[in-house]
Image (cartoon, grey):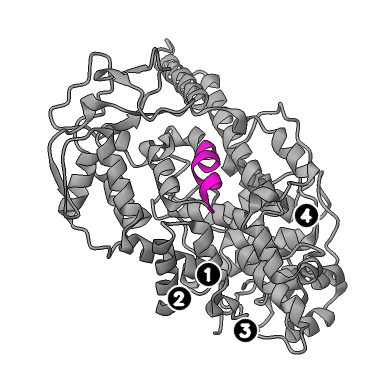
């Protein structure tokens, strides 16, 4: 496979131009590579975000089967003390859904008052909207801490397979951080609905995502009501009829797949089944919520979860869905539907295909998909068992690096390979946005894809080379320690700051030492071909680490 030629780069001068000049022909094998190191590299590239310094030797010494067994039981792997301390210092992960929504509503109220003050100004001039600015800062702070929680673990956690699967399953059950309440709920969604379930039962995860307010809000199921429903005085006037958004994506994306054998009538019937699945922002009183339709029993309510079933919103008529005659049953209609979808052969095939595509090849063999699908059905959707079947397959053991890294995979593997002790991930969040994969930033419910066709183009390669150049030369302030009480900046401001840092000639506060190419090559071992090593050796020392990180060898896994 020949990658497109990277156009000349003018921004970073000779360094970036030298990186771009490498021939874009990935090496599929390395002559005389140590077998144990090659095997270790393969699993670190596929089941982790690439090797960090010492990982190749560590995995080779432990043995690949033993390392995989550890990764399949992440709860048994302790987090290093420095990472545990970093995560313990974050404030947003300690907040409940209810607290986050209350904070957002207060921010919205302040912003509304600011807009009213603008309109009421007697001289027609708009006064500074400090309240609106404060709201944006608070939202930015929650987003930044969500990024801290995700990226610090992706870079430093020994539970690397769990981190890879968090990225995979978040995209499978995607919600967009930029929509309304989800500005403050995405971190909670990942922490509560995705992360605990990536190696559990698929039915548990699909149920957790269905009931999380981030999904209820993103795909509008909280607005979906039975025909004729009338909100009580002062209630939610947006809930004005049946909304099919979530029902459609639940079948098309989350479970059965686009060719899963359902009809438009099935979408409508499932939407009717799921009416009443909504949010109850008020605290329960004596086991009841007060909602638009009146008091609601808190069935299914757990702790500080905002999920509640509202019988007044529910369509109590009989339904026929996927060949099942469904009698009126309130919330249990939806639970039954999730049971059916989680155990459906089309769901097994859809999930198996996506896992095989993520971990093996953009076009996985039908035989592999069939085996994974059978394992899914035989184990009632046990995702740990499915992953075990995947890593045991001959297709997975094929060592050829045929997968092109997504921006997220490329950035995480680059920083891990350098061994930089990262304390500030804001520049990485900015780089991800510049590379076209902003964290939690996919607007469409299908999430970011991870095939070569999605990410391989000349402009994208140019952006990666710019990042590799800045990282290798130590220009990114990855070790800056910010005042925890300082106002957070929105993503666009972080992008501007990162651009400036990358363009500077002198080191900025928190910048890292230049990356040593010899150490980097030792960390990556057989990932870098003899051809690339020769090109690196023949280049000026200041260019060598950038050449490695910008090479076609490194961009594949």
Camera-nearest residue between 489 and 528? 528
Q: Which residue is mark 1?
A: 390
Q: Which of pointers 4 and 2 indicates the residue nearer the eye?
A: 2
Rate crowding at label 1 as few (under 14), some (14 to 19) or many (20 or more) other CA atoms within 10 Å. Answer: many
Q: Position of residue 455 (x, y in %)?
A: 51, 67
Q: Which mark is residue 368?
A: 2
Q: Are marks 4 and 1 in contact (CB under 8 Å)?
A: no
Residue 181 in the image, given as x and y percentages of width and height:
44, 32
* Whole-number angstrom distance, CA of label 3 to CA of label 2: 28 Å
Residue found 39% across the figure and 17% down from its top: 119
> Which residue is disc 4 drawn over?
475
Q: Which mark is residue 25?
A: 3
Q: Residue at x 14, y 43 (%)?
A: 319
Between marks 3 and 1 in the image, the one whose residue lies nearer the viewer: 1
Dot 1: element? helix
Nearest the eye: 306 or 383: 383
Magenta residue span: 188-199
Q: Quadrant of residue 113?
A: top left
Q: Is residue 197 magenta?
A: yes
**Residue at x 53% of width, y 36% of height:** 188
In this view, which residue lies farthest toward the front? 378
Query: Which quadrant of the structure image shows residue 85?
Result: top right
Q: Is residue 430 above or below residue 133?
A: below
As helix, strand or loop, the secondary structure at mark 3 comes to loop
């Amino acid at each position: 496979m020949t990658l497109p030629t990277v156009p000349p780069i003018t921004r970073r001068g000779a360094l970036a131009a030298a990186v771009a000049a490498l021939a874009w022909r990935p090496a599929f094998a390395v002559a005389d590579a140590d077998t144990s190191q090659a095997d270790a590299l393969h699993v670190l590239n596929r089941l982790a975000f690439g090797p960090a310094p010492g990982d190749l030797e560590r995995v080779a010494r432990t043995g690949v089967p033993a390392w995989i067994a550890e990764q399949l039981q992440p709860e048994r792997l302790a987090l290093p003390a420095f990472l545990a301390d970093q995560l313990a210092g974050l404030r947003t992960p300690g907040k409940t859904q209810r607290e986050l929504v209350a904070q957002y509503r207060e921010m919205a109220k302040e912003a509304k008052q600011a807009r009213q003050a603008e309109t009421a100004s007697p001289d027609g001039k708009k006064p500074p909207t400090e309240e609106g600015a404060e709201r944006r800062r608070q939202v930015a702070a929650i987003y930044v801490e969500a990024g801290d929680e995700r990226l610090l673990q992706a870079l430093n956690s020994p539970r690397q397979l769990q981190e890879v699967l968090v990225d995979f399953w978040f995209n499978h059950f995607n919600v967009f951080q930029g929509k309304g309440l989800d500005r403050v709920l995405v971190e909670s969604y990942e922490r509560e609905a995705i992360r605990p379930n990536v190696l559990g039962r698929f039915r548990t995860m699909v149920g957790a995502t269905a009931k999380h307010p981030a999904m209820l809000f993103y795909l509008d199921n909280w607005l979906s009501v039975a025909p004729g429903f009338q909100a009580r005085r002062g209630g939610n006037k947006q809930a004005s009829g049946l909304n099919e958004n979530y029902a459609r994506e639940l079948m098309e994306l989350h479970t059965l797949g686009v060719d899963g054998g359902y009809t438009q009538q099935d979408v409508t019937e499932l939407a009717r089944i799921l009416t009443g699945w909504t949010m109850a922002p008020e605290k329960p009183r004596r086991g009841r919520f007060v909602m638009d339709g009146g008091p609601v029993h808190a069935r299914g309510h757990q702790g500080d979860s905002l999920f509640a079933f509202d019988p007044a919103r529910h369509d109590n008529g009989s339904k026929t869905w996927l060949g099942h005659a469904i009698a009126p049953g309130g919330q249990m209609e939806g639970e039954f539907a999730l049971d059916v979808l989680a155990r459906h052969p089309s769901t097994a095939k859809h999930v198996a295909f996506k896992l095989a595509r993520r971990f093996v090849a953009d076009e996985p063999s039908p035989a592999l998909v069939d085996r994974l699908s059978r394992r899914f059905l035989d184990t009632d959707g046990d995702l740990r068992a499915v992953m075990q079947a995947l890593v045991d397959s001959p297709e997975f053991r094929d060592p050829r690096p045929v997968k092109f890294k997504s921006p997220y995979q490329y950035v995480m593997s680059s920083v891990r390979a350098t061994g930089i002790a990262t304390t500030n991930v804001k520049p990485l969040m900015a780089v991800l946005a510049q590379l076209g994969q902003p964290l939690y930033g996919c607007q469409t419910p299908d999430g970011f894809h991870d095939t070569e066709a999605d990410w391989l183009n000349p402009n994208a390669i140019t952006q990666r080379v710019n990042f590799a150049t800045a990282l290798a030369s130590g220009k990114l302030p990855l070790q800056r320690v910010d005042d925890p009480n300082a106002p957070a900046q929105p993503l666009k401001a972080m992008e501007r700051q990162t651009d400036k840092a990358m363009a500077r000639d002198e080191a900025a506060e928190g910048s890292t030492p230049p990356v040593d190419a010899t150490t980097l090559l030792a960390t990556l071992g057989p990932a870098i071909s003899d051809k690339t090593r020769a090109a690196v050796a023949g280049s000026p020392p200041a260019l060598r680490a950038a050449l490695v990180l910008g090479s076609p060898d490194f961009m594949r896994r």
